[in-house]
Image (cartoon, grey):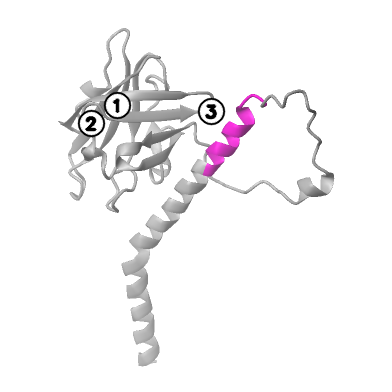
């Protein structure tokens, strides 16, 4: 009985020790699957490619049966955020619920939509794992490029400034008439429990 209890205690200890890592792995999987789902949706929404007049033959019924759609229970991304400098690619989800922020960036509601005039605000967690979510957002500098791709088009924003504000500072959500801004917000400092500050990156849409 004592040996069994000892084994159970060891197993429980290992589960507690590895739980954060397992959770990160699961959230990484959901991030990848969410990005795949966005690509599937985007491909379906793109106009058909001109085949030069050659009619495409429909797939036989048995071939269609062999390629069932992949199942995914998460929300459908509305866009993808890419920052080449920090090797970041994240799904953008509507709303900033805790569920959305576990594996993507959340679009703050009641402000500008992606590519719209005003201030488009995205928030994400600053995960402790290197390179995850907005972990390396502090590496961005003025002039760096941020790209957001929706199912219809891509928008390129150039970073203008990065700064630290108190969590209660809502001035970073403001915009002036004619502005096309993008604001990225995450917690600061990185490893502090319940941080009271926010790291803010603000960029401006590059007009074609």
Q: Which residues are magenta?
A: 36-48
Q: Which residue is mark 1?
A: 183
Residue most extreme to the right: 61
Residue under the image location 52 percent in, 47 percent down: 33
Mark 3 and mark 2: Cα distance apart in space: 26 Å
Where disc 2 sits, the SS reads: strand
Mark 1 and mark 3: Cα distance apart in space: 21 Å
Residue under the image location 35 percent in, 18 percent down: 206
For label 2, count other residues whose C-alpha is less than 10 Å away and answer few (under 14), some (14-19) or many (20+).
many
Residue 97 in sight: no
For residue 179, above or below residue 199: above
Where disc 3 sits, the SS reads: loop
Q: Are marks 2 and 1 in contact (CB under 8 Å)?
A: yes
Looking at the figure, which quarter contains the C terminus? top left
Pick whichever of labels 3 and 2 is earlier in the sequence.
3
Instruction: Residue 1 in the image: state x and y as whole percent.
Output: 39, 92
Q: Main secondary structure of the magenta part?
A: helix
Q: Are marks 3 and 2 in contact (CB under 8 Å)?
A: no
Horizontal relation, residue 58 to residue 130: left or right: right
Residue under the image location 24 percent in, 26 percent down: 143
Mark 2 and mark 1: Cα distance apart in space: 7 Å
Pick whichever of labels 1 and 3 is earlier in the sequence.
3
Q: Is residue 206 magenta?
A: no
Q: Is residue 44 magenta?
A: yes
For residue 200, the mark is 2
The quadrant where residue 125 appears = top left
Q: Which residue is mark 3?
A: 151
Pick whichever of labels 2 and 1 is earlier in the sequence.
1
Q: Give 86 or 134, whichever is nearer the viewer.
A: 86
Foreground: disc 1 or disc 3: 3
């Amino acid at each position: 009985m004592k040996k069994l209890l000892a084994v159970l205690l060891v197993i429980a200890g290992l589960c507690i020790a590895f739980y954060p890592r397992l959770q990160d792995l699961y959230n990484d999987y959901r991030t990848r699957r969410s990005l795949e789902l966005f690509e599937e949706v985007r491909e379906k929404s793109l106009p058909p490619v001109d085949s030069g007049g050659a009619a495409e033959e429909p797939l036989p019924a048995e071939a269609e049966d062999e390629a069932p759609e992949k199942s995914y229970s998460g929300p459908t991304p509305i866009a993808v955020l890419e920052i080449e400098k920090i090797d970041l690619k994240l799904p953008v989800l509507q709303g900033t619920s805790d569920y959305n922020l576990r594996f993507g960036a959340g679009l703050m509601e009641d402000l500008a939509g992606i590519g719209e005039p005003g201030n488009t605000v995205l928030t994400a967690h600053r995960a402790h794992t290197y390179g995850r979510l907005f972990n390396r957002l502090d590496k961005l500098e003025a002039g760096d490029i941020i790209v957001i791709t929706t199912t219809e088009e891509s928008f390129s924003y150039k970073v203008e400034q990065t700064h630290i504000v108190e969590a209660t500072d809502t001035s970073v959500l403001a915009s002036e008439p004619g502005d096309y801004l993008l604001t990225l917000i995450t917690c600061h400092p990185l490893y502090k429990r319940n941080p009271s500050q926010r790291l803010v990156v603000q960029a401006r849409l590059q007009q074609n």
